[in-house]
Amino acid sequence: MKLGLFVLIIGYLLSQFYRAFLAVLAGLLQADIGVGADDLALASGLWFLSFAAMQLPVGAALDRYGPRRTTALMLGLGGTGGALLMALAQNAMHLHLAMVLLGIGCAPVLMASYYIFARTYSPAIFATLAGAVIGIGSLGNILSALPLAWAAELMGWRAALIAVGALTALVAVVIWVTVNDPPRAESADGAQGNLRDLLRIPALWLMVPLLVVNYAPAAGLRGLWVGPFYTDLYGLGATSIGQATLLMAIAMILGNFAYGPLDRWLGTRKWVVLGGNLGGAVSLALLWLLPLSGVWQTALLFAAVGFFGASFPMMMAHGRAFIPAHLTGRGITLLNLCSIGGVGLLQTISGYVHRAAPDAPPEAAYQTLFAFFGLCLLVGCLIYAFSRDRTD
């Protein structure tokens, strides 16, 4: 099981890579295949939307078939196919289709490890384990920053993506060989349960709005808008943008490890989540106020958004505490659907927000984006403040 979990983490590393690599390749894609910022925003949003659309089928598959077959087949076909299509892309449509395939391929990887944690390990350490997986897997964020920029300059972005696609196929095969499915859980009456049973749990409803928006600012900025921000306002190239996104990626990794044990140390999940997301809102407010404060000053603020925006594992632990064992797969994927679907929705909307913002001064469009993400986060926090706290 430990070897299987390690390989699943490698798969999640690839998932993190695929959700964030457009920010670094933005300038190259614009030059080579003629896509614009709106095309890139839509492509990034399509990854998250296709990822989200697969969550409920993935949850049912985890409960019925287990994590081994579910993950190996989807990652092998969707992930590898999407990477190769991206490497061969000639226009925006190819880019969009590739991102859809990549979203489908990456959809089960994180939830497979969470399913194993929930079915195998003590509930009290779920948040720590969940945070560790994201923290380690977020090295994919780092690989999609400066290392990808170097690889793209050394061998070309198409060859770099072919190499990553080959690695994805290899990881899928190793998952098939090494992952062991935990025993299936049954309800007291033997029923399998369904989505309606989850929707009847009142405690989950007040968590959903913050789940929808909590990861969207960090994912949206790191995955797309940091690149155009520094290109348009500071005239930076791919390598310099890679350095700024690397800092944000490291902060997101540290945030996942920082959140992990706090529920056991402080005896609360709700207030850890609420405090962290308010910190993210403050960071976005400072970016809105000070977009021209300097490359490294803004890079530190982007890093703060990434650090505070790493509350997803703690929110998953909070929600999982209300989910019956026989609905584990469906429950965790429903929560993930809310989070990733929110990222896809807000990422897609962000392209229209950017386009509708004033053209002058140049920073106005990005200030509008920061305000949009920050206000969404504040609304989610306000509703979540009324949720029930629960620790294991």
Image: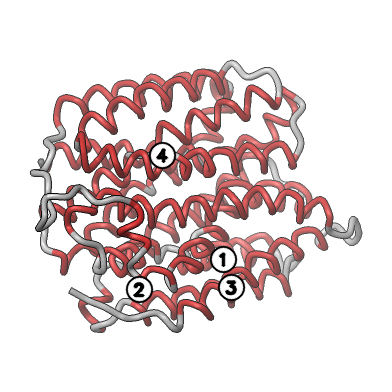
Secondary structure under badge 3? helix
Secondary structure under badge 4? helix
Q: Position of residue 88 (x, y in %)?
A: 59, 16
Dot placed on the residue nearer the N-terminal end, 2 or 1: 2
Work out whether 65 lies above or below 110: above
**Looking at the image, which is closer to me, 286 or 15?**
15
Q: Residue 300: which numbered mark, if any?
A: 1
**Looking at the image, which is closer to me, 151 or 325?**
325
Query: Dot 1, crowdedness within 10 Å: few (<14), some or many (≥20)?
Result: some
| Residue appearing at x 65%, y 72% in the figure | 375
Q: Position of residue 343 (x, y in %)?
A: 54, 53
Dot placed on the residue nearer the N-terminal end, 3 or 4: 4
Q: Quadrant of residue 26?
A: top right
- Please name the amino acid that badge 1 sits on: Leu
What whole-number distance in Å separates the C-alpha atoms at marks 3 and 2? Answer: 29 Å
What whole-number distance in Å separates the C-alpha atoms at marks 3 and 4? Answer: 26 Å
